[in-house]
Image (tube, coloured by chain):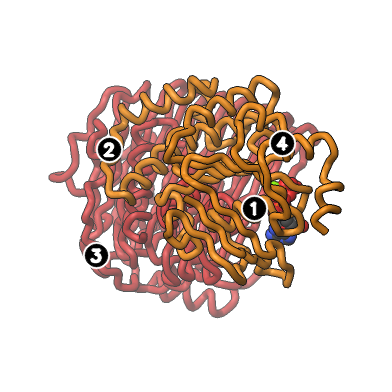
Amino acid sequence: MLEIKNLAVDLEEEDKSILKGVDLTIEPGKVHAIMGPNGSGKSTLSYVLSGKGGYEVTGGSATLDGADLLDMEPEERAAAGLFLAFQYPVEIPGVGNMTFLRTAMNAQRKARGEEELSAGDFLKLVREKAKTLKIDADMLKRPVNVGFSGGEKKRNEILQMAMLEPRMCVLDETDSGLDVDAMKLVAEGVNALRSEGRSFLVITHYQRLLDHIQPDVVHIMAEGRIVKSGGPELALEVENNGYADILAEVA
Amino acid sequence: MALPQVKQDATAARLDGITLPQGASWASHARKNALSRVNAMGLPHRRDEYWKFTDPVTLVQPDAPKAAVFQQDEAPLFEDVDRVKVVFVDGVFDAAQSSDLVAEGLEIERLADALATDIHWAKDLYGVLETRGQMPVARPLAALNTATATDGVVIRATGKAQKPVSLIYLHQNETSDAVIHNVIRVEAGAEVTLLETGPAAARFSKVLEVDVADGGKFHHVRAQGRDHERRAVTHCFARIDSGSLFKSFTLTVNGSLTRNECVIEIVGDEAIAHVAGACVGDGKDFHHDDTVFVTHDAVNCESRQVFKKVLRNGAVGVFQGKILVKEGAQKTDGYQISQSLLLDGDSQFLAKPELEIYADDVACSHGSTSGAIDETALFYLRSRGIDHTTATNLLTLAFLAEALEEIEDDVLAGALQDQLEGWLARRS
Ligand SMILES: Nc1ncnc2c1ncn2[C@@H]1O[C@H](COP(=O)(O)OP(=O)(O)OP(=O)(O)O)[C@@H](O)[C@H]1O
Ligand SMILES: [Mg+2]
């Protein structure tokens, strides 16, 4: 599904290297988790995959089902099936949540040569998905993320994911800022989407989320590289001992 | 103070080319008075304090610069709204295209007909509100309008108007130089909506005088027409009394030069005045200027100025807005915001926000900003599959939303929203 090879990325503005050769392959239907200290490059990886400006790829490649992601516009990557749940979802005053969702859905459908969803069908779908995430109608009517609490913003990301049904979902700290119940809701939302043809890359600092969303593989990222990969037990090790041992071991 | 020679010459040259209205009328005095004020003030010049950002030369020169007539490819605005249509072609009333000028709660007359009567209620307003609006800032082009206008409408709202009055200004002649003067009196407790649409002429001078009595409500929604080369200078002079409401919104798309002045005097307690505008300009031949002056001379009143401009490819936007709170106008709530969205580095926004306050118990705020599209928001939208153009348009409409929200009627607001979307779509 997703294949990242020796990916190296600099900041465009200043001469600073952030990713220093990332290798990562995710098979269809698998859930991979990335953990790692603050500033190790986890969000940068997610941004570069989804096409945010300000970064310069200096080496390596990233493909989704063989197609070169790095060569596509952000909207093309989305249409190809990539989705990023932002660590910091963006507030957009003046753009209604519903308008936003509907425009996004129809844009992707159009790009894939599918028919647009009728207003009625769209509404039905949104209401149904929102309900399972406990997002009330009032929130749907408000401008995108404006006045949402931290947890509401994260649930709104998962709602978008549920609506757009991407094949490759990247979740950047979707668990941070969530209370216990909200975390469960989000995890259920993710688990409901798990299927043979859909993969997940879950960036998190906490083992707790991984209790709910069982990962197949856990990676540790440090200083712009994946320094260790293993099974779910790796997350437990981090939870108990922090990164010091792991980093010392690979140094 | 003697007028500078350049001003004397320009004023004389302009007046030379004008045939002043003949014959006795109740308006004769106001006209004569206006003419002498024009001579005393002189027509505007780039060096005048409130013309620094906008060169008035094409508004002052004797002949109207040629302006191609734009072939519309969309349905005229407000087609589905039940309204009294008053049509002017290049500034001349056209009875054939207009409705019967009757509606419950309203007295509507063509200005030319009103002028032919011996006495008329409009005498108390014609040129009167305009004169009041000349202090402390001179507005010579408005005085020139009062001195020379022969067409327009006079409207008296005596109750809740059954339907809006829709002034439709058609432009058919490439060199037309139109002058329109409208006078509106909203009686105590009455309510009326005035719609204005269309480019009007190659060069258009319009004055609107509005007097809103106690508890009256006046709504104004205007769209200035899509002709690219037209020029317009418009003035609205409003005096609003106790417990009244005045709301004005203007949408400007295209036009080579637009100067919209709005001068509001709040004379009664607990009155509300909102004036708002949205403009979208493309190209270096687009210059749009909003000049607003709100005077608070009563207690417990609220005023809002909300102006938003989207500019691209070298378009220029100007905002000059003032809130004046007179001595004793306590508990004034005054708000002013002017913002521009610059879609490229060539476009320019020039702002002169002013506050002048002589009362101590007031809450007034103003702000002016100029910025580009929010890249973070743009990326967020694109990351969900929305293409660059659509995302930019969504953010552009979002930027204008605060101004459009000033329109109370959803149907009217929707019509203007459609026109804006059309403008964006044509440029995508
Ligand atoms: N636009 C930028 N300008 C300057 N520095 C940047 C920029 N983007 C990323 N960085 C730097 O790159 C490094 C990696 O940042 P990134 O956000 O990817 O880390 P992270 O692993 O997601 O951290 P966290 O766990 O705190 O979310 C940090 O040192 C950060 O300061
Ligand atoms: Mg991060």
Residue type (three-letter) at the residue carrying disc 4: Glu
- The percent coordinates of residue B254 (x first, y second) are 37, 60
Please rate how many residues cluster around mark 2, counting C-alpha atoms within 10 Å: few if below 14, some from 14 to 19, many from 20. Answer: some
| Mark 1 on the same chain as mark 3 | yes
Mark before the other along the chain sequence, 2 or 3: 3
Mark 1 near ligand 1 (CB under 8 Å)?
Answer: no
Above/below status of B245 relative to A114: above
- Give the structural element (helix, strand or loop) at label 4: helix
Residue A233 numbered tag: 4
Q: Chain of mark 3?
A: B
Q: Circle 3 sits on which residue?
A: B69
CA gap between label 2 and label 4 equals: 86 Å
Q: Circle 1 sits on which residue?
A: B368
As drawn, is B48 to the left or to the right of B407? right
Residue at 34% over, 62% down: B20
Tell me the orange chain: A
Residue at 37% over, 73% down: B62
- Give the structural element (helix, strand or loop) at label 1: strand
As drawn, is A54 to the left or to the right of B73? right
CA gap between label 1 and label 3 equals: 35 Å
